[in-house]
Amino acid sequence: MFLMDYSEGQGWHTPRIVPYAPIVLDPAAMVFHYAQEMFEGMKAYIAKDGSVRLFRPDMNIARMNRTNERLCIPELDKADVLQAISAVVNYEKDWIPTDEGTSLYIRPFIIATDAHLGVRPAHNYIFCVILSPVGAYYPEGINPVKIYVEDEYVRAVKGGIGFAKAGGNYAASLRAQAKAKKLGYTQVLWLDGVTRKYIDEVGTMNVFFVIDGEIITPALEGSILPGVTRDSVLALLRMWGYQVSERKLSIDEVFDAAKAGKLDEAFGTGTAAVISPMGELNMDGDIIKINHGEIGTISQKLYDTITGIQYGALEDKFGWSLKI
Ligand SMILES: Cc1ncc(COP(=O)(O)O)c(C=O)c1O
């Protein structure tokens, strides 16, 4: 794993690759009490030509610093982070699986380490990068999932930390996720925290709906994580000439469209699955089926194109795939 320390006055220092091992912390370490923590999620792929590649790492690294800024964690040097990730991934490249759809998951994170019980930003931090081989997300083909529309619990609110990749957001999401699972649903559709009318995200993914020829994703207004996959999907759809909107989208608009036969596809986007089609939505017992529970043509085309670029099988017009 990669480790680097931060001490006030000294800045980030002592970058190193060390054997994977427990991190020993004082029980009063601030991360345990006030959750001053951030993380990222990305993957390394073995491309068709045998090279090791990252997908748009600049986007993850920029997001790291936006999260850091919001959580009062000291900024990282972007070039240093890319060098650190590239170094540890290359060091462990024999662990990158090569079967179709497999990759090496990369988890950079930062924790506040001061032994201090007063609430304030910490003066000391650890930046760490750990790795794990991951299997194909869809070993048996892409299966649309059932989604529960959550109208009690919320994930994040504008002004809070929803746009940041902070562990606290995920702790806040567990109760609703457990409720959905108990009811037989894979994930929850998150509504906005103020009115519970507008759609934010689905599970830990950004979300898209295809309604009457318009492809809609909620606008980024503070409560939504700006996904790298979301940005890539928007760029591809615009290049292909689809009508794309980033705007407010109410859950009622989606249900009305479905009942009028105008909801053609719905899918989540994220690093783990790339594209995750939704086959069913349940809002308080009102159930709609989407595209007969099958993956739609736009979802399939996006999945094939993004994975094709990630594995170097398709032309990379945007320069997204980085050989390291
Ligand atoms: C809450 C949340 N939304 C959206 C995403 C999708 O972001 P990305 O496409 O960068 O993986 C993630 C992470 O994967 C997430 O945790």
Image (cartoon, rainbow, N blue to C red):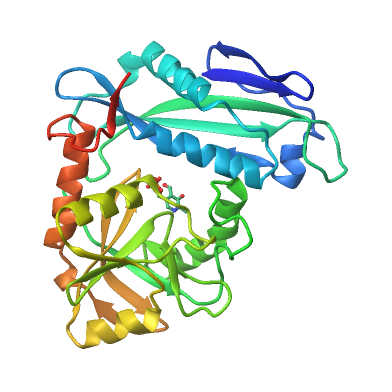
Q: Is residue 191 positioned above or below 122 on the image?
A: below
Closest to the observer, 281 or 315: 315
Q: Compared to 162, does 72 lie above or below? A: above
**Depth check: 117 or 51 in front?**
51
Q: Is residue 195 left or right of residue 75?
A: left
Q: Give the image quarter of residue 207.
A: bottom left
Question: Residue visible at 21% across and 24% down?
Answer: 98
Number of disc labels: 0
251 relative position to 308: left or right:
right
**Front one among 223 and 316:** 316
| Quarter occupied by residue 216 | bottom left
Q: Residue at point 51% right, 78% down?
A: 196
- Residue 291, image x, y percentages: 16, 71
The quadrant of the image that shows the C terminus is top left
Where is residue 82 drawn, in percent x and y? 45, 23
For the point 13% across and 34% down, the residue is 315
**Whether residue 21 can be seen here:** no
Q: Is residue 323 visible?
A: yes
| Point 51% across, 25% down: residue | 129
Left or right: residue 205 compared with residue 67:
left
Q: Is residue 314 above or below residue 86?
A: below
The residue lying furthest to the right in this view is 118
Where residue 267 appears, as percent x and y from the top left, is 28, 61
Quarter residue 272 falls in: top left
Left or right of residue 14: residue 78: left
Location of residue 15 in the rendering, given as x and y in whole percent from the top left corner: 59, 14
135 or 122: nearer the viewer: 122
